[in-house]
Image: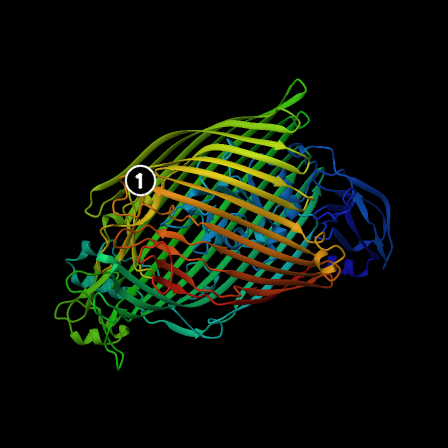
Amino acid sequence: MLLLSFAAFAQTGTLRGTITDAKTKETLIGATVRISGTQLGAATDVNGFFSFAKVPAGSYTVEVTYVSYNTETIPNVKIEADKVTEINTVLIESAATLAEVKVVATRQTNTEVSVISEIKASQNIVSGISSQQITRSLDRDAAQVVKRVPGITIVGDRFITIRGLNSRYNNVMLHNAFTPSMETDVKAFSFDVIPSGQIDRLLIYKTPSADLPGEFAGGVVKIFTKNIPDQNSVTLDYSLGIRQGTTFGDFKESKQGANYWTSFNNGYLDLPSNFPKDIRAVSNNPALVELAGRSLRNEWVPVTSTATPDQRVSLTGNFKMKLGNVQIGNITTVNYSETRLLTTNQRNDYNIGANDVTETLFEYNDKAYARNNRVGVLHNWAFRFNNNHSIEFKNLFNQISNGRYVFRSGQDIAQNYRPNNHSFDQVYRGIYSGQLTGKHKFNNDKTVIDWVAGYNNSYRDQPDYKRYRSDVVDAATNKTEIYIPIGQAQAYFLGRFSSKMNESGITGAANLTQKVSAGEKEIELKFGGFYEIKDRTFKARNLGYVRGGNFNPALASSDINTLFQNIRNDGGIRIDEQTNPNDSYTSNNTLIAGYGSVNIPFTKKFNAIVGVRVENNRQQMNSAYLGGAAAKVDNKITSVLPSANLTYNFTEKTLLRAAYGVTVNRPEFRELAPFSFFDFDFNVVYEGNPNLKIATIQNMDLRWEHYPTPSELVSVAAFYKYFDTPIESTVDLGSTGLGSKTFITNNAASAYSTGIEIEIKKGLGNILPGSRIFEKTSLLFNTALIHSRVSLGDRGIGQSDNRPLQGQSPYIINVGINYSDTKKDLQINLLYNVIGRRIIAVGFEAYPDLYEMPRNIVDLTFSKGLGQRWTLKGGVQDLLNQPWRIMQDSNKDNKFESSKDFFVQKYRTGQLVSLGFSYRLL
């Protein structure tokens, strides 16, 4: 209140102006403007414009800084009460070459220009996206943000693929520590756990170097969250979303307990604390078995409500202070969201017989209701003791609840019945990442030491995944009969599944950079070490139901609630343990790495970085096979990974990069475990493979880069990758029957992937000089064209020998058009994204490969400032609302035609219309 009162009654004025390049006369985006003696600071916008409101009257010194430009200091700038002071300043570009760009003092890292500058100064081939660019979209989390980066796509709304490669071939770091996995079945980080508002910038390193992790093929993604702000502020953001086909309609979901909206597990669906650890152990006590069956929450009918609009709210505090000579910054964000989605899914399956005759197995129609709740906290501290020493403490926590109910109808042709099936699923996911980092400079910046100590933990809790099958026995009356197994339960037809996964990791790393004079040249030596230990525990429970003695047949024709009111050993149903020895596993991974590299500037224009990284990795897994025999994995592998990155600067604005390096790809814990899991939604079984081998990749890259202005970039890249024993998801040859297909992970013999990438970030003002619209419009365009092929050797008997690597897309296109009018505080953005078809699972002769088909996505967003504190935001996401499809090339002619080939899955998510506001409280 005191701050607000002071702002209201103090004698204040406004300072504004435009910053331009002294040589080109073009405006500079992202230049930092500071008023000395105050905490006021800001970055120029896309038109080079800045503005400070409510500046106390007085005389000030204004400082303007920009990466690769000389600092401009303007003394005696007078601010008068209730008046506007305008200063228009030019900056002179420094004489440093591209590879010699140095950043002195604090600079902004979240603007488009700062990210472009970071890419420009890097010795690697890098792509990235800034917080400034993120604000131009309706992207809600890191998964949606990252697909705007060249060569990047997203699988399943949360897993990243780089250059069209499967998500397993990428590595993700939060700052400089590995992220934990939040999934039980895949080697991937779930990008949807990080809200977009918490991201400072996101960089993708696409070529190996000694100081990067050695496990990747597509790239290493580094997510940087926000740290020291320019000025104190408190901002509230709120938005509503209306989704076509979902909002205001009937919405069905499993019954939940109190406080479910918080996204934390309230224990409502958990097994009772006194529930037997194994029903088989108490099978000689029928009364206890009956009591155990009744003790569960036997609620098998969904509750119906009206789907409310999606809601998102966040509160962000940015605080900057000084304690003696120490600058202290804190950024804290608390965010919450609730979303709902109803989709109508068509699911079909086929076998291909002799002469390519197609046998239709089933044609299902699913109504899938999904509700997601999320709460997140970002809490970062930074301490800058001087220009040479700083320490940061970063904390990120996110908790997500995913509830899902599916009603299935249609027909099962192969088994001759009409299903009336239901599934109720609930998953809780959480992640915490904490890091303490430091950076220290000595000897006039000739010696630099940086280090990180980190801890992370993730968990996945699936307390009660219920499924039951009932058959339509009279289509005229829609009369159904519940399928109740006899003798031994079949949990996927009538039963419940629960699982718990917990993964934690401890990380420590340190790097030393030393500059050494060698005649007139300065050579840079770099050494470092890395240590990580990661542990995972996974436990699952399968419980089914069977007919008890003297079963009353009338119960099968009753409703599901009536059936579960008759849990009794005589005349009703009883619970039956179906948990197997392979339903649990423990695993750990220890990685010790060290590296050394040298950066040699052979001439003022040409320099080379060569290095080698040695990684000693031990991966252990303990589980059991279905029959109970021990399944153990103990892989100790030392990998020697050389790399070279060359840069030639033709001019200060144009350069050429070339790179070569060797990397690896290791199996993930779940992929090694022989655990089997039935997915009701996709009607498939996922199974691990303890015999998986490590994959080795040779990477070659060439990229030409041109920077017309500090805010613009044009690049063309070519790459080639060779894989030895690549790891792929395949359909098991033995699953050609009438039931569910089994997906298992295997090694192919070899594969290659080659392609080109083009990226353009360009203002359109010089295309039509004098046009007010074009002067305020910029273009973002990037595309990747990729070709890959797999060699099966004797590993893929029956598989197609003329196909791309599983998960590889042949093309990726992103286009963005941004209009920004600074004076009207108006911004409009049109965004487009599409990817080429890619194999999601490798098939065989009788069951062709499964392809995810292209889908054109168009988003339109806007934001409008309303005074000094309010901003109105809105837009439409997925304007075209094209269907998401999985198809098979049924006639095997390498063409996909809806009239000749068949789709396996198909659904639409509907357009999402959003409207919200941002209000600056302080």
Q: Residue furthest left?
A: 550
Q: Callout 1 environment at 10 Å: few (<14), some (14 to 19), or many (20+)?
A: some
Give the color scheme: rainbow, by chain, secondary structure or one colour.
rainbow
Percent across and percent down for residue 679 are 32, 58
Q: Would residue 353 be visible to someone looking at this image?
A: no
| Quadrant including the C terminus | bottom right
> 369 or 8: which is nearer to us?
369
> 134 or 756: which is nearer to us?
756
Q: Residue furthest top?
A: 519
- Disc 1 residue type (three-letter): Leu
Q: In the shown orientation, is residue 243 left or right of residue 131?
A: left
Q: Would residue 382 be visible to someone looking at this image?
A: yes
Q: In the shown orientation, is residue 370 left or right of residue 124?
A: left
| Displayed quadrant of residue 418 | bottom left
| Quadrant including the N terminus | bottom right
SS for tag 1?
A: loop
Identify whether 869 is placed above or below 377.
Answer: below
Residue at 81% x, 61% y: name it: 9
Residue on which the image places disc 1: 692
Percent across and percent down for residue 31 are 72, 46
Identify whether 377 is placed above or below 441.
Answer: below
Q: In the shown orientation, is residue 671 left or right of residue 911?
A: left
Residue at 83% x, 53% y: name it: 86
| Displayed quadrant of residue 869 | bottom right
